[in-house]
Amino acid sequence: MFGNRDFIYLTDHCVNSDRLYSFVRFKVKNYGSCEATSGLTSSLAFTPEQMSVVTDSPVHSSNSDDFIAFLDAELGASSPESSPDKEAENEDELESVRIKRHKIESTEETEGSTSEGIMKQNLETSTKVDVCTHPGSFGSMCIRCGQQLDGKSGVTFGYIHKGLRLHDEEISRLRNTDMKSLLCRKKLYLVLDLDHTLLNSTLLAHLSSEESYLLNQTDSLRDISKGSLFKLDYMHMMTKLRPFVRSFLKEATEMFEMYIYTMGDRPYALEMAKLLDPQGEYFNAKVISRDDGTQKHQKGLDVVLGQESAVLILDDTEHAWVKHKDNLILMERYHFFASSCRQFGFNCKSLAELRNDEDETDGALAKILKVLKQVHCTFFDKHQEDDLINRDVRQVLSSVRSEVLSGCVIVFSRIFHGALPSLRKMAEQMGATCLAEVDPSVTHVVATDVGTEKSRWAVKENKFLVHPRWIEAANYFWEKQPEENFIIKKKQ
Amino acid sequence: MFFHIVLERNMQLHPRYFGRNLRDNLVSKLMKDVEGTCSGRHGFVVAVTGIENIGKGLIRDGTGFVTFPVKYQCVVFRPFKGEILEAVVTMVNKMGFFAEAGPVQIFVSNHLIPDDMEFQSGDMPNYTTSDGSVKIQKDSEVRLKIIGTRVDATEIFCIGTIKDDFLGVINDPATV
């Protein structure tokens, strides 16, 4: 069917009427039908024997009038048999077009040998004018025009399908269109990390002797949705899902379009996705592994098809997201197995060794879910004035964060120099005011030692004297923690 | 398009297969070796249908293996640019959809899906017309036109379009 784009390259080539003629003939042959076309193109009707332009079409604009007049003149000059008026007299336009189509088909059959040449010529001219921008490639072919490309440009999207690459403009186009539909459904994006965030895995060989009892307690792989401890024999691994993770995913999927983004390799990531989502309802082709990232040892939102202003990230490793710290919600690490504790340099007993686990209803995931709900609620708050499309989840996140410790005035005392700037930043992001010296407005003294001058001042003035972990805990749980749990012990 | 053609291949056979059943062994090894493989020139070898001729074997020095030149008839499948194919949708996402016609992977980008079909996400992502009468989702059968092909050593990739007359869904799994 003739579209507006076809029309544009008609005008570019109408100077050469022979080529135009063959082009239109090709088009007519190819599409087989001229009936239900736009006003402009329906006023053009060509046959191999005679070329003519219907001038009395009621729909065309003055601009197209000019064009048709020009065409008429050009064609009249080059083909002596043309009769411009003959078609104009024909009342039943559709009927005539149909007849002509038959004619064209019959003549094309007889001219089989030449039509190929014409086709070639037209393919050449159309590629010249209608340049495809090659929005992406699949198996090093353009996804729009099928042309062979060099296959090295653009961002790979191997996690969606092997051999798929997209260019930046196409990615931003997809993000924009997706954003609109997403906002209509009142959803945002959520990128989830696997290890230490949603689950904890260990190699079977790394199980400590105190943990070997777990081997008899694994849940069946046949009924994944009920279990939380799985032994994956062929990967030589054991995986423990974090308590509350199933309810977490179920509730989060109402508010978010979820991605998995892990530093593990592809088979591992897919296997874990199967454990978390046995029905395949949450992460449909949205599992990104380290093989899919664009930078080594870094996670980036460039392979996530979502506007950065609408993405929240849940991860336990801050430095993996150097470019997207504002989107990040830092998770407290989940160490169920001893090998994972050792990996991070803790010498304490693992949860598995203690035969303990995080609390189902009051654990880290339950707490973070509350934060996610709050952010989601604020983002889609009807009372805000600006448009949904202009809102930024990063601002919402930082404003929610800044209420955690609001009203607290903090003075630090005897904190290790290397840790001080990050602690101070953390406290300020949560809305606390940090002072260098004590004054009557101070509410908390954060110290590692009760013997310092500031600590003694706090005790004397009846202010809170807390350990730096108080700030870290508030940062993980997005809640001011009870100060009495963070009292500094006296050194013996 | 399918073709029934004659191809040739040099088969190496271990001496333990020599004997009365040499020919049968050779044929079954040939089938195992070539069926399901892919060559850039001929496309996918679907099935071996017959043996034209088995040439004289040549004993390899040192190994004892014998090389037989075998001429065989087979059915091959090769997609062409401009060809109309029927394929089963395997994955639908916001970029378009992926479909399979036998061993061939076809991608139809959303540029080449009619403009009146819109992407609907959810646990069953699909492309649907505004009136909801036509729906493309996983396992739908579609008729599409190939606009580009690339044949690798083991895979064939195609770009398809359904933005043309008489193309699109031919069987909706939801209604069956």
Image (tube, rainbow, N blue to C red):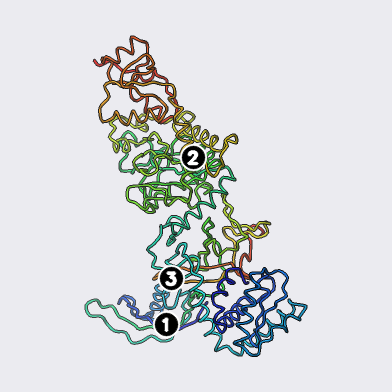
- Mark 1: amino acid: Leu
Q: Where the N terminus of chain A falls, by quadrant?
A: bottom right
Residue at the far top in the pictured view: A460
Residue A323's quadrant in the figure? Answer: top left
Rendered residue at 41%/75% (across/down): B40
Mark 3, secondary structure of its residue: loop
Mark 1 falls within which chain?
B
Q: Is residue B45 above or below residue B169?
A: below
Task: Give a yes or no on whether discs 2 and 1 share a subunit.
Answer: no
Pointer 1 residue: B7
Residue A51's quadrant in the figure? Answer: bottom right
Rendered residue at 34%/22% (across/down): A435
Residues packed near mark 2 inside 10 Å, few (<14), some (14 to 19) or many (20 plus): many
Mark 3 falls within which chain?
A
- Mark 2: amino acid: Val
Residue at the far left in the pictured view: B62
Pointer 2 residue: A393
Residues packed near mark 1 inside 10 Å, few (<14), some (14 to 19) or many (20 plus): some
Along the horizontal axis of the image, is B15 left or right of A218? left
Pointer 3 residue: A148
Question: From mark 2 to mark 1, how far is it between C-alphas?
Answer: 62 Å
User: Could you tell me residue A5's position as x and y percent?
Assistant: 57, 69
